[in-house]
Image (tube, rainbow, N blue to C red):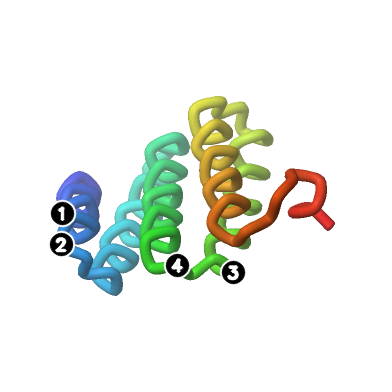
Amino acid sequence: EAAVDRALGHAMITAGRWDEVEAHFRRAAATLSALGYGYDAQECQMQISTMWLHRGAFQQLGEAVAAAEQVARRTEQPAIVRFALLFKLQLWLRTGTSTLDAADA
């Protein structure tokens, strides 16, 4: 079930069907987390961040990325930390922030 939701989430990103992206990845993340697949659940959360980025929903992206980075650091998931940092960089670039220090202020 989680694998199907995950695959459908990826397909919906490609199709730009944003509401469905979020629904599929949230369901997949919840199922994977309940089964103890922490990395896979976190990866689904990062795919939701992809959706926020494509939609230009920078407030939601910032909140999602901050939460994802915290969890990834706590659970020692370096690949997810890298995803979060890349999304932070995208956020800073797309919102016109000229320096990393200014973005944190």
When asked about the image quadrant of residue 36, the answer is top left
Task: Quickly name the residue at label 2.
Answer: 15
Q: Are marks 3 and 1 in contact (CB under 8 Å)?
A: no
Q: Are marks 1 and 2 in contact (CB under 8 Å)?
A: yes
Between tags 3 and 4, which lies in front?
A: 4
In depth, the one of 6 and 31 nearer the eye is 6
Residue 100 visible in image = yes
If you read the primary sequence from the N terminus, does the residue marked by circle 2 or circle 4 appear first?
2
Secondary structure under tag 3 reads helix
Question: Up-down: is 60 above or below 38?
Answer: below
Q: CA–CA distance between discs 2 and 4?
A: 16 Å
Identify which amino acid the numbered label 3 is placed on. Gln
Secondary structure under tag 4 reads loop
Between tags 3 and 1, which lies in front?
A: 3
In depth, the one of 69 and 4 nearer the eye is 69
If you read the primary sequence from the N terminus, does the residue marked by circle 2 or circle 3 appear first?
2
Identify which amino acid the numbered label 2 is placed on. Ala
Residue count near mark 3 (Cα–Cα under 10 Å), binned few <14, some 14–19, many ≥20: few
Q: CA–CA distance between discs 1 and 2?
A: 6 Å
Image spot of residue 34 (x, y percent)? 41, 49
Task: Quickly name the residue at label 4.
Answer: 56
Task: Quickly name the residue at label 3.
Answer: 59
Identify which amino acid the numbered label 1 is placed on. Ala
Secondary structure under tag 1 reads helix
Q: Are marks 1 and 4 in contact (CB under 8 Å)?
A: no
Q: Residue at x 36, y 45 (%)?
A: 32
Residue count near mark 4 (Cα–Cα under 10 Å), binned few <14, some 14–19, many ≥20: some
Image spot of residue 43 (x, y percent)? 41, 42
Question: Up-down: is 14 above or below 57?
Answer: above
Q: CA–CA distance between discs 2 and 3?
A: 23 Å
Task: Quickly name the residue at label 1.
Answer: 11
